[in-house]
Every structure is written in C-alpha cells, then in structure tokens.
C-alpha cells in the first residue's frame, strides 16, 4: 500500500492506517456504470478500495456524456465496463478492478454478488433494483441504494442492523414494485448531470463509512436531496409488514416475483401473510370439495363463478389464492394480476391444500 | 386541524408543499383517502407517508401541526 497516495486521508482524525487497511481488503460491487456508478467508482478507486466489481452491459452513447464524466467523446460505442476498468487502473493500479460486461439478472445475480462485502445499486430501473434489493435482503448483504429523478435524489443504506438490531430494506419503503412506466426514469424525465454526481459521491461516502466504521452511515434512514433549493430531508425507516421475502435465495429466485405477476408461496408464508392486516385469502375450489376450510378465514369464490369476483373491487393489498393442488389458484392469480397489475401483492399457494393442509385446518 | 404537507418528485408537480386544513381528519388512513380524492393522480401512484419524518407502516394518529411527507420511489440512475 502506497501510504503517500493516501496521506491526506491517513492523517484524518479518526481514520488512520486501520481504516485504510479495511478499505484495502474491502470488496465492493457496483451495479450500473452510469450517472451514479461513475462518480462512486472514481472516488472508491481513488480512496483505495481493494476490489471493485462493475456490472453493466451498456455501451457509451453521446447522451451519457453530460453526466457520466468518466467517459470521453472518443469512448463512444465502447463498452462502459471496459473503459471504467482502463481509466480506474490508470488512476490507481493498486485497486483490483473486475469488469462484468453483462446485465445483472436473476440467473447471474448470486454468482455476481458472490464474495463482495458491499453492493452499490446505481441502476436505472425498478426491475433490477427490486431484484438486487430482494437478494441482498435475503443474504443480509449491505446495500447502498441511490436513485435520482429530475432534480432530486434518494440515498439509503439497507440490510445493516442498527444499534437495536433492526435492519430494513427497500421494500420497507415501497413494498410493491411500480409498474413499467408508472415512475419516469432519467431518459423520460431528464436529469441535470451534477445531480447523480452529487448522489453518487454521497453513496461512495456512505460505502467508505460503512467499511471503515467511521461516522454514522444512513442506516434505516432515507435521505432525500433537492438540488434546486439545496435542501435535504431525512426520513426514519421502520420495518414494514406488508411484504414477504422467503428465507433463502433459492426460494426467492424460484418464486419468480414480478415475472409472472404473482408469487407462489408455501404453507409457512401463507400463514404469515394471512395474519397481516390487509390480506384476503380466497379458496377457489368448488362448493363440494373437501377438506372444508374455515370460511371466515378463507372466503369461497369457486372458479366456476370467478368472474363475479373479478367484477368486484378488492380493497385488501395482499390477495392469496388457494385451491386443492395449486393449479387453479395459479389461473386465478393470473386473472387477478391482469386486473390489478402491480398495485397488489398476489399470491398462489404452491402445491395447494393437499400439500399444506396442516397449515390450513 | 391544520397540518403541513411536504411532497417530493412527481407528486410535488400536482400537490405543492402547503399548510392544509384537513378538518376533522385525525389519522393517516383518512388523510390518504382525503388526499387521493382531492388529487386523483395520487391514487394511481406508489408513495410512502412519513409523519414528522418517521415513515409510517400502519394507520397512525395525526395531531395539529404535524408535518406529513409524501415520498414516491425514484428509479433513475
């Protein structure tokens, strides 16, 4: 480690050699080498983070350059991760830069997150954000969340327990993923270049604080920043109970959340969702089928007359569909999803009453 | 009863920061319905309420001069 390179941070009160060593052994994965990712990467590399992984499958285009100032006009058409790796290595060869020229998806997320201690979400769409959040929450992997919209930014640190042992994640803020087009992204809404610069650098600051143990990271707090009036507004995040994540990543990724529009759950998950305030459980079997369930808990709406239910407005946020083997309930869940989109959490009991009768009777 | 409303992102475009007389409304569930009726665009959006800077997960009572923040999700990067 070149101590002269880091001299100005080494001599900081409360930082020193210990903190620098922590940085040198830290492994940080940055997802998205765009407006948020670029500034974070530059400062993390300069500060001497030991290993920096970068995931992005995008190439550099002209409309990126006003805010992704790591790239030059001569880089147009090149892969972002290739340019990032070259530039950051030039800047600080002590940092081990690993580039992943791919899109982070369900099939590769576990492998990509692999050995990284901290994940930074600098992506630009809800689908990837919810995927990163859910996997990091299940793995209890520290996640730095940053996002921008217009002249405003948000920043938070997830999955890191506070002094009371409480750890929160993005679903404690927004349990249900917004539908495509519901919230505009930068391409639709515009963004002033300095805004992701500021938020991305703040994120790098949070990452350095988290790794070195200095200061007070934004644990269980959402910071909102408004560039136009230079105001910050901070919200304290508490644990929400209107969402359910499985206990293992395997279960999470096979649940296929968001892909099919409904989530297949097991008996244990049914048990906890059922007890939530805003849950409606619907038995879609015909009147004559056994075993009979408690009608006060499981309202009966047979498939033969399911359209009547679709014509009614359901107020509950969670809708759980069950049937004998979990096949008709999937059809019912699909119909519910078609009607309500992503405004509700829709569940189908996988394997049905036949498999989970101990939880139901 | 008067409360303070603080809005962010797209929500601020149709519901500006303001002091609002909410009449007899004394809890966040009723405030939500009231706001969604008065500002129909809000009903179609995802957002989280915070009372005096604390995110709320359940229906919470409201008091005179409480500040209620309405925060939407951002996705841009």
Image (tube, rainbow, N blue to C red):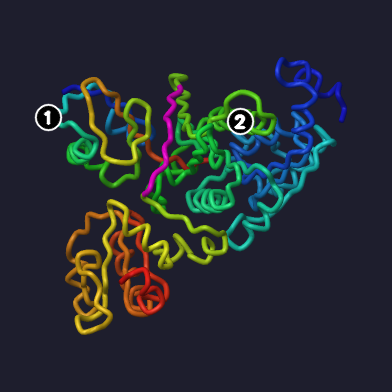
The image shows residue A310 at horizontal and vertical percentages of: 22, 67
Magenta stretch: give its range.
Answer: A232-241
Above or below: residue B61 compared with residue A303: above
Q: Secondary structure at mark 1?
A: loop
The residue positioned farthest toward the bottom in the image shown = A288
The picture quadrant where one finds residue A299 is bottom left
Q: Secondary structure at mark 2?
A: helix
Return the residue at label 2.
A206
The image shows residue A76 at horizontal and vertical percentages of: 69, 44
The image shows residue B44 at horizontal and vertical percentages of: 28, 47
Return the residue at label 1.
B24
Chain ID of residue with mark 2? A
Quadrant of the image containing the N terminus of chain A: top right
Chain ID of residue with mark 1? B
Left or right side of A164 for A25: right
Per the rendering, the mark at residue A349 is: none
């Amino acid at each position: 480690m070149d101590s002269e390179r880091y001299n100005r941070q080494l001599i900081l009160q409360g930082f020193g050699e210990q903190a620098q060593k922590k940085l040198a052994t830290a492994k940080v994965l940055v997802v998205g080498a765009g407006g948020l990712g670029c500034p974070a990467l530059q400062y993390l590399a300069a500060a001497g983070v030991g290993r920096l992984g970068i995931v992005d499958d995008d190439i550099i285009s002209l409309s990126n350059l006003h805010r992704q100032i790591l790239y030059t006009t001569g880089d147009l058409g090149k892969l972002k991760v290739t340019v990032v790796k070259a530039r950051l290595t030039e800047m600080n060869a002590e940092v081990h830069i690993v580039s992943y020229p791919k899109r982070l998806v369900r099939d590769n997320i576990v492998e990509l997150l692999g050995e990284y201690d901290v994940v930074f979400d600098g992506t630009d769409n809800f689908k990837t954000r919810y995927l990163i959040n859910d996997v990091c929450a299940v793995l209890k992997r520290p996640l730095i969340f940053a996002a921008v919209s217009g002249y405003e930014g948000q920043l938070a640190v997830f999955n890191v327990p506070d002094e009371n042992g409480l750890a929160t994640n993005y679903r404690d803020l927004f349990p249900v993923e917004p539908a495509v087009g519901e919230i505009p992204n930068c391409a639709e809404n515009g963004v002033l270049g300095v805004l992701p610069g500021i938020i991305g650098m703040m994120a790098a600051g949070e990452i350095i604080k988290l790794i070195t143990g200095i200061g007070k990271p934004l644990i269980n707090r959402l910071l909102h920043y408004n560039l136009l009036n230079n105001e910050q507004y901070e919200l304290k995040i508490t644990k929400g109970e209107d969402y359910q994540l499985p206990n293992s990543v395997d279960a999470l990724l096979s649940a296929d959340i968001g892909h099919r529009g409904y989530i297949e759950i097991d008996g244990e998950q049914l048990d906890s969702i059922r007890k939530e305030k805003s849950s409606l459980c619907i038995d879609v079997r015909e009147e004559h089928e056994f075993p009979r369930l408690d009608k006060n808990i499981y309202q009966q709406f047979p498939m033969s007359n399911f359209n009547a239910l679709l014509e009614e407005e359901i107020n509950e946020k969670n809708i759980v569909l069950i049937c004998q083997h979990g096949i008709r309930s999937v059809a019912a869940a699909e119909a519910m999803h078609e009607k309500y989109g992503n405004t509700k959490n829709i569940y189908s009991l996988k394997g049905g009453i036949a498999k989970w009768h101990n939880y139901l009777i | 009863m008067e409360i303070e409303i603080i809005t962010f992102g797209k929500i601020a475009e149709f519901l500006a920061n303001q002091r609002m007389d909410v009449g007899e409304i004394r809890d966040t569930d009723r405030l939500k319905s009231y706001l969604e009726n008065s500002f129909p665009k809000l009903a179609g959006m995802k957002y989280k309420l915070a009372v005096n800077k604390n995110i709320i997960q359940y229906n919470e009572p409201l008091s005179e001069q409480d500040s209620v923040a309405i925060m939407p999700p951002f996705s841009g990067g």
